[in-house]
Image: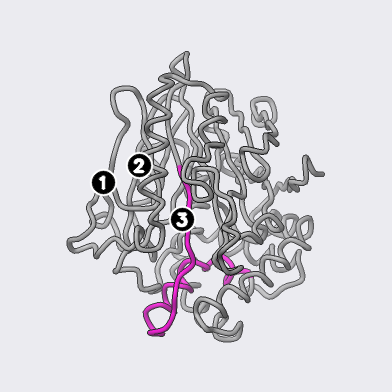
């Protein structure tokens, strides 16, 4: 079924079966994702799809050792959508593939990556979290809402590109995950736990401590920011570079419960053994989005969902603001858009989802309290 052009994919059962259901229900969008990334990899990395498939093989063993369910789910997605497993894996490795190409090909460039995330309290002191998710303009044709009920472990939902395992999400334990792309000079695309596999694994966690433990327990392949919050009012931000525990810088909310992030390293610094922060080279607007969201949040302390809808729709520094629009002067592969905005109410197990730019006021509400009871 759909709401306001957002396909809602509902799956249940073991990992392989859930993947098959996902792939079958979203088959046309999964194929569009595969087609889009063939173009992305060719444009930014100069790699054809055969090269991409060969590179993807190196990640199978690290994924299987860390989170076997991801292998099963991707196998199921491939079966359901009539693709090869390695095609689905290659889509889920978009971050790692691009960075591997950057290191090995002197002429490789990287696409801009944008998101603005937050954790805050509402007027009653209840936890809120959420973000905008910005990506290349084709994402309007690939995004889905995936709602999953595993046979074991928490139920969960995620707003994600069709065929990918997970992006931002919430589970039935009241754990929420928001995320931001980060880039450092140590990103080389070397085999390890990929970004989107880590996002999927975090949705299996029962509480914030378990999520933090999982995040630091393995060698991650790519830089990324993970903002984790819970229904009991806890929140933490992890700026992660490639590596394990030693490559994470942690942050917690201020005294007002506010925790904000964009696409540059703001806790761990820009240099040191973790490598130089390259985020601002690719996304100079990150500084201004962070500045703007901080100002707006502090002008409306203890703002609720309605307040955050207004903040996520803000156009300061247009077209590169919190609510991002394509730059008409840019080339097609240099145009990006806010594909979705999400505000989580973990206490109520409720998600508010903007279909497309938040300024368009096309929000849907998914209430999981009874579904997940």
Residue 237's label in the rendered image is: 2
* Numbered mark located on residue 288 in the image: none
In x, y percent, where is residue 152?
59, 44
Residue drawn 33% across the image and 54% down it:
240
Q: Which corner quadrant of the image does residue 232 belong to?
A: top left
Residue named by callout 3: 198
Sequence-wise first label, 2 or 1: 2
Q: Is residue 63 above or below residue 166?
A: below
Judged from the image, the secondary structure of the residue bearing numbered disc 2 is: strand
Residue 314 in the figure: left or right of residue 279: right
Image quarter in which the N terminus is found: top right
Which quadrant holds residue 181?
bottom left
Q: Which mark is residue 267?
A: 1
- Measuring from the top left, give residue 127's x and y in whole percent: 46, 25
Q: Residue at x 51, y 45 (%)?
A: 204
**Residue at point 38%, 25% (across, down):** 298
Of residue 297 and residue 257, the one placed in the foreground of this image is: 297
Closer to the N terminus: mark 1 or mark 3?
Answer: 3
Q: Is residue 113 magenta?
A: yes
Horizontal side, residue 322 vs residue 284: left or right: right
């Amino acid at each position: 079924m759909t709401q306001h052009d957002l396909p809602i994919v509902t799956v249940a059962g073991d990992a392989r079966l859930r993947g098959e259901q996902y792939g079958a229900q979203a088959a046309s969008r999964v194929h569009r994702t595969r087609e889009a990334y063939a173009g992305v990899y060719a444009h930014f990395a100069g790699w054809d799809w055969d090269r991409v498939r060969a590179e993807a093989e190196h990640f199978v063993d690290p994924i299987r050792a860390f989170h076997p369910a991801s292998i099963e789910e991707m196998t199921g997605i491939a079966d359901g959508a009539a693709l090869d497993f390695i095609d689905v894996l290659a889509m889920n490795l978009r971050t790692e593939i691009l960075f591997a190409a950057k290191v090995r090909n002197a002429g490789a460039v990287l696409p801009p990556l944008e998101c603005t995330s937050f954790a805050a309290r509402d007027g009653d002191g209840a936890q809120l979290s959420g973000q905008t998710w910005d990506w290349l303009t084709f994402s309007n044709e690939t995004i889905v809402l995936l709602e999953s009920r595993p046979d074991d472990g928490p139920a969960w939902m995620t707003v994600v590109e069709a065929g990918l395992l997970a992006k931002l999400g919430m589970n039935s334990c009241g754990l929420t995950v928001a995320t931001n792309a980060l880039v450092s000079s140590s990103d080389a695309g070397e085999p390890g736990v990929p970004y989107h596999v880590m996002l999927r694994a975090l949705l299996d966690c029962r509480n914030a401590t378990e999520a933090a433990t999982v995040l630091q327990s393995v060698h991650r392949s790519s830089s990324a920011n993970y903002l984790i919050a819970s229904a009991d009012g806890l929140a933490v931000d992890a700026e992660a570079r490639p590596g394990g525990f030693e490559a994470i810088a942690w942050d917690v909310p201020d005294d007002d419960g506010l925790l904000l992030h964009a696409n540059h390293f703001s806790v761990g610094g820009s240099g040191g053994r973790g490598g130089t922060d390259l985020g601002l080279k690719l996304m100079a607007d990150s500084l201004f989005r962070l500045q703007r969201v901080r100002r707006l949040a502090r002008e409306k302390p203890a703002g609720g969902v309605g307040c955050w809808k207004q903040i996520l729709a803000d156009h300061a520094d247009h077209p590169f603001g919190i609510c991002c629009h394509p730059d008409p002067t840019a080339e097609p592969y240099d145009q990006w858009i806010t594909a979705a905005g999400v505000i989580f109410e973990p206490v109520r197990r409720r998600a508010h989802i903007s279909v497309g730019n938040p300024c368009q006021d096309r929000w849907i509400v998914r209430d999981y309290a009874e579904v997940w009871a």
